[in-house]
Amino acid sequence: MKTLLLTLLLILLLGYSLKVFAAPQTANQAQKTSKTAANNNAASDPGEQKFKQNCGRCHNPPDSLSPREVKAVVQHMRVRAMLSAEDEQLIRKYLAP
Amino acid sequence: MNRFFQLGFLIIGMASGLSAQSEAPSVPILSGAVAFQGTTTGGASSFTPIIVPVFVAPLGDHWLIESRAEVQGFIARDNGTTGPYSGHFFAAFDYLQLDYIANPHLTITVGRFLTPFNIYNERFPLWVANLVDTPIVYTIGTRTSASSNGGMVRGVAIAQPKWNLTYTAYASTSVTTENLQSGRAAGGRVGLFLPQAGMEVGASYQRFLQNGNSNIAGTYFAWQPPQIPLDVRAEYAHSPGGQGYWLEGAYHLARTRDEETWLSRLQVVGRIQQYFKGNPTPVDALPLTNVNQFDFGLNYYLPHNVRVNGSYGREFSSAGNANIWNFEIVYRFLFPAWPGGHQ
């Protein structure tokens, strides 16, 4: 019974997360889409290029990241994905111009 | 326990304070994934709810605290294919490490970290892995728990516009404490990454220093051609307990990587693997017979970082062939773990 309750709780948490995080990301998605479109036009953006070459090997760009979050995310990925220092800077500027 | 929390708050406060002094203020983040998996192997079904929270707190420009925990349940029938369902829940720290980014070529890590053998263990958490099941040879080089307790150095030894040479070296001590297990081992990995071709090759070595010392070696290959949404990955691993390889291909139904349509969100995945038995011990967690297996899966990437995937596999073994069905829904989350982080 305890296990079933815990399982239900996990499922509810999943559903709640979807509901809570979907709403604010709708607006952020629009920002990201426009950002992506802008960057697609400027295909020579070195930060975007580095993002695709390194981060894009495993996952898509995040829906949105505030400038304050970007530093933690990119520093985390520098260690985990062994980004070079130069690539880290370029990707940071790309995600939080 | 109170001291633990006080220390935690102090560290987060330091993170906030130090970050405020630097040019780009940062906040700690809470990321990770929530997933629900269903598996049927040879007629025996099981269900696995999982939460994997990742906490990252930068302490200025050079220091970083990273942790990943894993809380998962395992719900299955008591007698495999018959009897009532019952479940157990497990929790473990995958990593809890302090990193010091010393210079562009060196990062020093202490604490508990993912054992860097080949690439699957470090780079394919459940929200990245294309198939639910881990490869058969996954346990080679990652004993005893896929995590190590000790120290590690890593970084980009040489960074050139057309190629990067990366390295990792580590030493781990034996820990048997529940949820924090690790093996006594030392090893390393080198990798050559060609960013313009989207190709990486590398090799790993480990000297396992318990249960009778042994040498473990492996090599890996990854290729993501820049113009085509194709993802090819492969690993080979060898140990006294056994050896084998896996080769996986995944393709988004699109002409280019940038194409965004409802169809391009669909990914077709295939994997083949072969395992050849050596002299496995219980700690190896390897099959006791030779195994051939193929898997075929479909992944659909929904908006807002939700992915649904299903797969079918067939295992061929002298112990008996089996069909393997998997289903998974996974949601990737990321939000600041400190007030004002959305700014």
Image (spheres, rainbow, N blue to C red):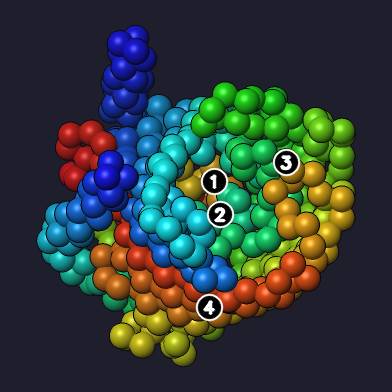
- For disc 4, the neighbor class at 10 Å (few under 14, some 14 to 19, many from 20) is some
Nearer the observer, B88 or B158: B88
Badges 4 and 2, same chain = yes
Estimate the x, y position of residue B293 in percent, counting from the top left: 68, 74
The residue under label 1 is A80
Quarter the C terminus of chain A occupies: bottom left
Residue A64's place in the image compared with B227, above or below, is above
What is the three-letter code of the residue carrying label 1?
A: Arg
- Disc 3 vs disc 2: which is toward the camera? 3
Q: Could you tell me which chain the residue with mark 4 belongs to?
A: B
The residue under label 2 is B123
Q: Which image quadrant for residue B109?
A: top right
Q: Secondary structure at mark 1?
A: helix
Residue B316 as seen in the image, left or right of residue B180: right
Determine the residue positioned at 83% across, 59% down. B277
Dot label at residue B283: 3
Residue A80's place in the image compared with B43, above or below, is above
Of label 4 and label 2, which has the lower sequence position? 2
Residue B77's place in the image compared with B147, above or below, is below
Residue B88 as seen in the image, left or right of residue B242: left
Gap between marks 1 and 3 measured at Cα: 27 Å
Of label 3 and label 2, which has the lower sequence position? 2
What is the three-letter code of the residue carrying label 2?
A: Arg
The residue under label 4 is B312
